[in-house]
Each structure stands twice: as C-alpha cells, then as structure tokens.
Image: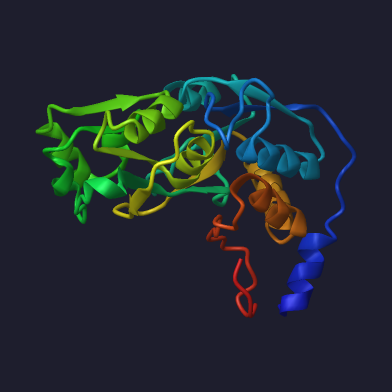
C-alpha cells in the first residue's frame, strides 16, 4: 500500500453516527495531560477525539491509577488507560500506544550535579512521582532503596516548587509535566534535564475485542491528522509524541 493510499484511508475515515456513550477510566489530576477541574488536558482531549471518531461520546471516570485495571476487569468501565503489559497477559485487549511519557531527572544548574546514572542520586535528596520505583527500572529502584532522602508524591506542582526553592536536589517526573509547572513558577531558576530513562507508552485496554479494533482505527486517523499536531503544539509548544504503531504504512517516506 502506498503512502497516499494509507493517508486517504486514515484521514477520510467516515465518523459513524453517535451511539451510546463509553465510560473511559483515567487517572487523577495530572496537568497538562489531565486537568480534573475543567475535564480537559492533552490526554483527555486526545481520548475524547478518538472516541468521537469511533461514533461515541467519552464519559471520563477519574480513579487512582492503582484501581483502573481492576475496575475495568469487573465491568466498571468500557475503556481504561494502562501502562505497557506483559506479552503473555490475557483477559483484556490492548490498543496501539496512544500517548508517550518521558520521565527525566531535573536539577538546578547552579548545583552542578553530575547525574549520568541512577546511582548518582543515591546520596541526594530526591522527590519522584508516586510509583516511580516500580516503573523506572531496577537501577533506579536499587539506588533509591538505600537513599533515606528519597520520597514520592502525587502533588507534582509541589514537587517542582521544592526543586526551584532549593528544598530538593533533584526531582523525577515527566518532561511535559515539569515544563507546565515551571512556566507557572513564581521565581525562574535555571535547570538542567538529565535523560536517564526510556520513554513509557500507555495503551487503552478493553474487555471487548471489537471495541479495541475500532479504537485502533480511529486512533490512526487522529495520529495522521493535522488536528493531532495542533493539539501537541497547544499543550506542549512542541511535537514530542512520536509513537510506534504497527498500522503505519511500511513504505511511507515520513515519520510521525
């Protein structure tokens, strides 16, 4: 299939007539991805558009990340947002990746910290996002297990403020989340970003295989659309959501 044929199929996909709403299980407040008060944010707007192109209205249900999988499995939702799964996991159907998080370590330039490996953080005061030790790999978990100055928090605005105010040597969080809160900080501080971790891809999970296939079709339509590019620029001021997708045309001469 040629490049243009692929684009025509994706971009001219007919949006079905609106049918029953779908309950979408998502995490709690996490700007700029999820803004709870306004039910907006990059992730919510992306999911809302994909579900719209499936022919449904998205009804978001905000729950702690630790409960998302169990709620979906027990029938309390139609779609759930989850991290990567084991290849042999059964019982649920998973979409192609729809969002990419890039966790980094951030320090202050004036501190001149040399951070090239998680072990370099073992003797530093570090504040990470909740659950970081479980998802950032064995090297990070081992380094933080011997660090009595390590803590995790769900309040990422406070996390950024503590770094900028000198109350922490380093923080660990997604790059876009840091940029969002840094822009709203009262006092600008020169910072350094240390890229120690691989990116994390999130997928949508379903109990219904047909619904999962419909989601993938609509997702591809969105990813190949200028609407998606504008959404990134609106929230991140740059395009940094490059995603793998097995449905991209093999012979396409462009990168998304």
Q: Position of residue 127 (x, y in %)?
A: 29, 31
Q: Residue at x 63, y 67 (%)?
A: 248
Q: Nearer the viewer, residue 190 or 126?
A: 190
Q: How many marks?
A: 0
Is 244 above or below relative to 154? below
Rendering coords of residue 85 (x, y %): 41, 43
Q: Is residue 2 above or below residue 184?
A: below
Q: Is residue 2 left or right of residue 161?
A: right
Between residues 112 and 47, which one lies in front from this camera angle? 112
Nearest the viewer among 228 and 193 is 193
Taking 206 as reference, is 228 above or below it?
A: below
Give me the residue at 58% from left, 21% from top: 62
The coloring applied to the image is rainbow
Q: Residue furthest right?
A: 17
Question: Is residue 172 found left or right of 44 in the rendered image?
Answer: left
**Looking at the image, which residue is at 27% across and 28% down?**
167
Quadrant of the snapshot with the C terminus:
bottom right
Instruction: Say if residue 169 shows up in the picture.
Output: yes
Question: In the depicted view, which residue is nearer to us: 237 or 9?
Answer: 237
Whether residue 211 can be seen here: no
Residue 80 at x, y percent in the picture = 57, 32
Dividing the picture into quadrants, the one containing residue 10 is bottom right
**At which x and y percent is residue 249?**
65, 72
> Which quadrant: the N terminus?
bottom right
């Amino acid at each position: 299939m040629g490049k243009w044929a692929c684009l025509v199929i994706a971009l001219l996909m007919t949006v079905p007539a609106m049918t029953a709403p779908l309950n979408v299980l998502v995490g709690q407040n996490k700007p700029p991805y999820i803004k709870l008060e306004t039910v907006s944010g990059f992730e919510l707007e992306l999911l809302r558009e994909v579900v719209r192109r499936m022919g449904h209205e998205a009804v978001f249900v905000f729950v702690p990340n630790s409960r998302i999988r169990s709620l979906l499995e027990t029938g309390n939702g139609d779609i759930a947002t989850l991290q990567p799964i084991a290849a042999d996991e059964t019982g649920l159907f998973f979409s192609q990746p729809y969002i990419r998080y890039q966790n980094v370590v951030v320090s202050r330039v004036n501190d001149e910290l040399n951070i090239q490996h998680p072990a370099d953080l073992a003797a530093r005061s570090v504040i990470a996002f909740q659950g970081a030790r479980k998802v950032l790999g064995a090297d990070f978990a081992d380094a933080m297990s011997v660090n009595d100055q390590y803590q995790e928090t769900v309040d990422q605005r406070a996390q950024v403020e503590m770094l900028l105010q000198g109350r922490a040597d380093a923080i660990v969080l997604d790059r876009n989340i840091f940029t969002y809160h840094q822009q709203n900080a009262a006092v600008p501080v020169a910072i350094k970003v240390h890229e120690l971790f691989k990116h994390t891809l999130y997928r949508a999970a379903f109990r219904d295989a047909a619904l999962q296939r419909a989601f993938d079709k609509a997702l591809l339509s969105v990813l190949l659309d200028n609407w998606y590019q504008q959404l990134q620029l609106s929230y991140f001021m740059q395009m940094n959501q490059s995603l793998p997708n097995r449905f991209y045309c093999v012979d396409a001469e462009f990168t998304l």
